[in-house]
Image: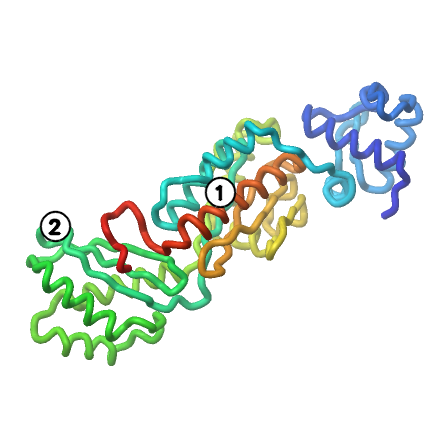
Amino acid sequence: MALDDRKKQILQAIVEDYISTAEPVGSRSISKKPELNLSAATIRNEMGDLEDMGLLVQPHTSAGRVPSTGGYRMYVDSLMEKYEMTAVEMEQIKQAASMKKQELEKIVRDVAAAFSGLSGLPVIGVLPAAEASVVKNLKIVRVDTCAVMVIVSDRSGLIKTKLLRLSEDISDEFAGQLTAILNENLSGLTLSEINLSNIMEVRSAIGENFEILTSVIELVHEAVSEIDERQIFIDGLPNLLNFPEYSSVDKVKELFKILEKRENLTKIVMAGAPGGSTKILIGDEIPVEGLKENSVILAPYRAFGNLNGVLGVFGPARMDYSKIVSALEFFTNQLSSVLTQDFGSKQKLIGKGDDSDV
């Protein structure tokens, strides 16, 4: 759809005015913008043409116009100017992304919550996942009387820890022996390759002793399964209550039900399929019933081991696309830096004692 320069200027002015005020935009308010230098009558005629083209809609007979889904799409694709972040905004994001090193999942969830607070919008997060996790190392650490920590890492550096309560105490020496036996028999295998034969070999190496074996193997399976599973979540849903679009209690309840379903979040992310760039879904482009008045912005981030995850912002179609895109891209770049350099170079869990051998 081709627009002449005047229509482009007017559409851009209407979209940005509506984003700012949440009120239908009339020709008189647009005519007051000095950069346009157009009369209200001329703007009114152009607005009529833009409405005929499906880029604007008139919610009420006597009201001004608001952007349609197509209008927002035209704005995002062709008219939106890059938002230049301030030094203060960049510093806030850097601090939010520079979380204390810990498990990958907690880092991503914490920074998603931080960005939700900074942006004032809900954030969708997708944790990085390997196609098939290969066990790199296992470690059994005695942490208390009748309690051990099972630590499993895969080749990409992802780590899961599980606490196991025992009916009888074991020595540190035996925990070390069990660690060596488990690694000898299970390291280098995927979850599907850990079978009865492997387990019997471990049992034979351990000797007659061991009720602990069944529990340990179960926890290894559980930990590797969690690494394999591509986890998705949403944080900050209550932020939507700050927007006039969500003033209806019944409407908000229904929206929350939709967004709290994992399968719906998965559909949203898959539709965006960020790949290596930021993607924006507007209105009917979101493949979930009941979300046509909303938009989603999705951006990828990188983790160690060439794994990729996604962070996205959900909100009304009337969102400040330019500012959110700039902030989200800056934020995911900062997160990528944390995960690939500071965290990824060590590829280990920090903050749970000395696990440098994991």
Q: How far across and how far down the image is residue 64, in percent?
A: 79, 26
Q: How many marks?
A: 2
Q: Report the Cα–Cα distance between label 2 and label 1.
A: 42 Å
Using the image as rendered, state which of residue 196 and residue 207 is in the foreground.
Answer: 207
Find residue 148 and report its image quarter.
bottom left
The kind of secondary structure element at disc 1 is helix
Which residue is drawn at the image coordinates 27% and 72% (left, top)?
186
Residue type, mark 1 in image: Lys
Q: Locate residue 324 relative to residue 139 in the image: left or right.
A: right
Quarter of the image for residue 11 reads top right
Secondary structure of the residue carrying tag 2 is strand
Looking at the image, residue 14 lies above or below residue 349: above
Q: Look at the image and tell me whether residue 8 can be seen.
A: yes
Residue 124's place in the image compared with 199, above or below, is above
Q: How far from the left and from the top, in percent, is residue 133?
A: 39, 66
Vertical placement of residue 334 versus 250, above or below: below
Residue 73 locus on image (x, y percent):
74, 44
User: Dot 1 corresponds to which residue?
Assistant: 257
Work out whether mark 2 precedes mark 1 in sequence or the reverse, and give the earlier one.
2
Residue at x-position 85% and y-position 48%: 1
Q: Amino acid at mark 2?
A: Asp
The answer to whether residue 330 is left or right of residue 66 is left
User: From the viewer's perspective, is 346 left or right of 273?
Assistant: left
Residue 271 appears anywhere in the view:
no
Which residue is identified by label 2?
Answer: 144
